[in-house]
Image (cartoon, rainbow, N blue to C red):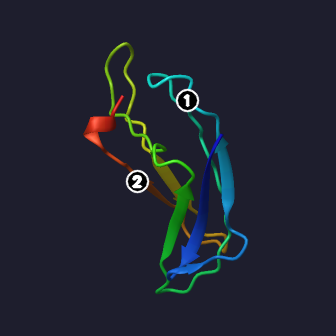
Amino acid sequence: MVSMQMYGLINGTDVADSASRFGLPARKSSGDPSELIGAMNIFLTLDADDYIEVAGGVSDVGVELWYSASQTTPFPRPAIPSVILTINSVSGGSLVVYMFLHNKTDKQQ
């Protein structure tokens, strides 16, 4: 079992109790990787000039945030990003959605 842990930071400082751990079963073979869709929900209080980060680590350097380009065959679909970050304003402000693509062409499938 390979583990991946992720957590939030505000202005470079760890957010208390924000870490999540995900377990990945070992690969069956080099051509059959394990896959996981991890999700985290963190509610933060931010000031106007604050910035947030998501950081983490893995127990095996072979773990990657996978990206897949859009395709037309065998069926059309848009790209699959490696990370999707959704930010909501709980106090009644507008919804902001950010999508980050990790585009490593040598790792696309």
Q: Position of residue 62 (x, y in %)?
A: 46, 43
Q: Is residue 10 above or below residue 3?
A: below
Residue at image point 67% right, 64% down: 19
In the picture, the disc for residue 37 is none
- Amino acid type indicated by mark 2: Phe
In the figure, is residue 107 to the left or right of 65? Answer: left
Q: Position of residue 47 (x, y in %)?
A: 55, 86
Badge 1 marks a residue whose secondary structure is loop
Quarter residue 34 falls in? top right
Residue at image point 50% right, 86% down: 48
Q: Position of residue 6 (x, y in %)?
A: 59, 60
Residue at image point 33% right, 33% down: 108
The CA distance from mark 1 to mark 2 is: 26 Å
Residue at image point 45% right, 45% down: 64
- Amino acid type indicated by mark 1: Arg
Q: Is residue 41 above or below residue 30?
A: below
For label 2, the crowd category at 10 Å Cα-Cα, with few meaning under 14, some 14 to 19 and many 20 or more, is few
Which residue appears farthest toward the top when viewing the image? 74
Q: Nearer the viewer, residue 52 or 21?
A: 21
Q: Position of residue 101 (x, y in %)?
A: 37, 49
Q: Are marks 1 and 2 in contact (CB under 8 Å)?
A: no
In the picture, the disc for residue 27 is 1
Q: Quadrant of the image for the N terminus?
A: top right
Q: Which residue is mark 2?
A: 100
Q: Is residue 51 above or below residue 103?
A: below
